Image (cartoon, rainbow, N blue to C red):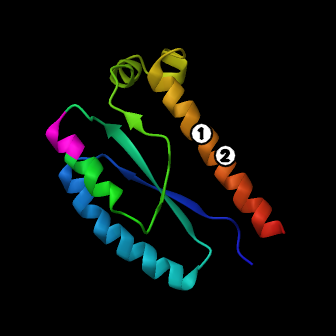
Amino acid sequence: MYGTIRHEIRINRPAADVWALGGLLDTLEQAREIRPDLRAALVVNRADGRTRIGKASTDALAGVTDLERCPVTIATRVAFPEALAAGQGVTAHAPGSIAALELRKLADWCADALRLYQDGAAA
């Protein structure tokens, strides 16, 4: 009926972003009243499990059941600001870095999820 729509909701893990997720979930619920086939996924970005607030945010996100959870987490990595300073994306600036690997895994996950969604819609 409608074209495929997939929306990733980016959460940066600090407490304010976790708190703001409630409003996004309300908006998603309203959108699904119009588009029941709308898919959304939670992608954790700038994750830092070394801090208390990072761990608390992870715990808070574990309780979110209204969204599909992307299995790939993008951690806080030095390669990101270094690539930005060089005027490049991290996959071009540091292709062998863990940051680039995480982004490639995220891209692969998104492509697979979209492919599965399209195959299901076509069936």
The residue under label 1 is which amino acid type? Ala
Residue under label 2, please give it: 111
- 15 falls in the magenta region: no
Query: Magenta region: which residues?
Result: 51-55
In the visual, does 108 lie left or right of 80? right
Q: Which structural element holds mark 2?
A: helix
Quick check: marks 2 and 1 in contact, CB under 8 Å?
yes
The circle on residue 74 is none
Quadrant into which the N terminus falls: bottom right
Residue 19 in percent (x, y) is at 22, 61
The residue under label 2 is which amino acid type? Ala
Query: How much space separates mark 2 and mark 1, taking CA atoms?
Result: 6 Å
Q: Which structural element holds mark 1?
A: helix
Whether residue 82 is visible? yes
Residue under label 1, please give it: 107
Q: Residue at 57% of width from left, 34% of height from top?
A: 105
Quadrant into which the C terminus falls: bottom right
Residue 21 in percent (x, y) is at 31, 63
Q: Residue at 44% of width from left, 81% of height from top?
A: 30
